[in-house]
Amino acid sequence: MRRLPLFLSAFLLAPAPVCADAPSNNSVVYDHVTIIDGTGAAPKSDRAIIVSHGRIKAIVPSKQWRSELKDIDVSQVRIEDLHGDFALPGLIDTHVHLATDPDPVFERAELRRFIYSGVTTVRDMAGDTRVLSDLSRSALLNEIAAPDIYYAALMAGPQFFHDPRTVASVQGGVPGQVPWMRAITHDTDLTVAVAEAHGTGATALKIYADLPPDLVKAITAEAHRQHMLVWAHAAVFPSAPMDDVGAGVDVMSHACMLAYQAGPVPPEYHNRAPVNDALFANGTAILNPLFAAMKAHHTILDATNYVYRIMWLVPNAQPAPYCHEDLAERITAAAHKAGVEISTGTDADSGWEKQLPSLFDEIGLLVDKSGFTPMEAIHAATYVGAQTVGQSDQIGTLEPGKRANIVFVKKNPLADIDNLRDIDVTVKGDAAFSRSDYQPISKEEAKNEMGDP
């Protein structure tokens, strides 16, 4: 077959842009909005956000924005009057699983739902990095309607890799013997193992299960030396939560796993005993030393309270649920009161037929069940989320110089956190996604989720 010249093939085969062409100077003004900037500062009304080349150039009172663009032909600037909207940093789900058992059609549909719902960043907590790398690149370049994706390579003890999820994530390979799903023992060359994991494009290592404290510490040290973050289960079995903190992991997932600090830690992940609820009958004070250590080490808690709400609904779940949602929510409340930074991870999305992803349920649970104010919940869903992926200097707050990841909602979320659900427009850099244009996930896209007839 005759090949096209390189320049012509690039022109003809380039994907269609996600949104309409921007003006030639690539400047947009989102005018007459109330700013909730993600820092916890008081809202600022009647403001204009000036975006240039995908970054926030300035945030000024609406009457002043023209003076900020005095060197630009204003007739070439796109002006979006969003009078009455509330502008927040793009939301971040810090615990998703896009490619445990890859289904590219559904994954793209799910990502579409995220971005049209105001979610501009997700943290994927282990799956097939071959698929995640492709999705991440396409999202970054706005070739698909999607939030930006940061993902992990997984490390665990050899016995963990009998888990059927690992088989699904390494199709064509052997669980425990590929760079993104690596079995670790004391004989493993960690320098090589971490470098190979980094080579998958992963932002971080996820320390999952069945590793003793000395290996958790050694993996963490080598990952940090190679400029990778470390995300860990709050209990790694037999390693306890305090072992994670002492090792220096950056983020710990699952609030209820912190409860294992109060009692004997089961020796293996798949044979773990449920949390002993009786230890917390009179409160969570037994965990105060752990919370103090987490605060001192700046260890973030990815609470995932939503998943505790739904795990008991799964028939014959394996491994079996180990904790009830009320304890998870109480532990999250106590950690928050103690000053631990908490992010908004879900670990399970809402059903494909739902209009919005489960992140809104997670945020709501922080307010309704764990004592957060709406402002604190927004901070958790924005700035703290940005910290979990090492990007708080780029995203997570609305500030000049940062990426223009913004969600505009029609009602005040500080008056009622459920007002976050009333999305108007999502902006991710140079791309804008009007909620009115959203195409819900179709039965055809979700057919593998439902099971083939």
Image (cartoon, rainbow, N blue to C red):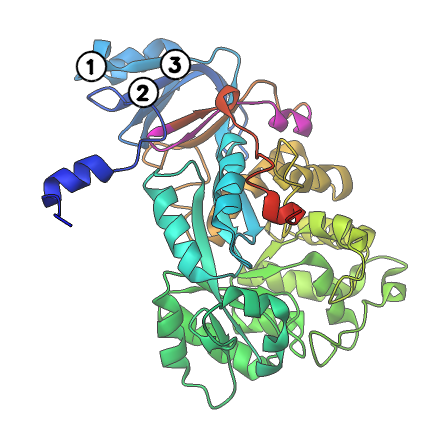
Label 1 element class: loop
Task: Check if mark 3's residue and mark 2's residue have beta carbons within 8 Å.
Answer: yes
Q: Identify the mark at residue 80; answer none if there is no mark.
A: 3
Q: In this view, does 192 lie to the left or right of 440?
A: left
x and y percentages locating residue 175 in the rendered image: 52, 75
Quarter-wise, where is residue 246 in the image?
Answer: bottom right
Query: Does residue 429 show up magenta in the picture?
Result: yes
Q: Which residue is label 1 attached to?
A: 70
- Residue at 82 percent across and 51 percent down: it is 326
User: Label 2 neighbourhood size at 10 Å, few (<14), some (14-19), many (20+)?
Assistant: many
What type is the residue that disc 2 sits on?
A: Val
The tag earlier along the polypeptide, 2 or 1, is 2
Secondary structure under the numbered disc 3 in the rendered image: strand
Residue located at (41% from left, 41% from top):
395
For disc 2, the marked residue is: 28
Residue stretch rendered in magenta on the structure? 416-431
Residue 232 visible, this orientation: yes
Q: Is mark 2 on a helix, strand or loop?
A: strand
Of residue 90 and residue 142, the one placed in the foreground of this image is 142
Image coordinates of residue 440 in percent, x first then y, are: 57, 30
Query: In the image, is 58 to the left or to the right of 87?
Result: left
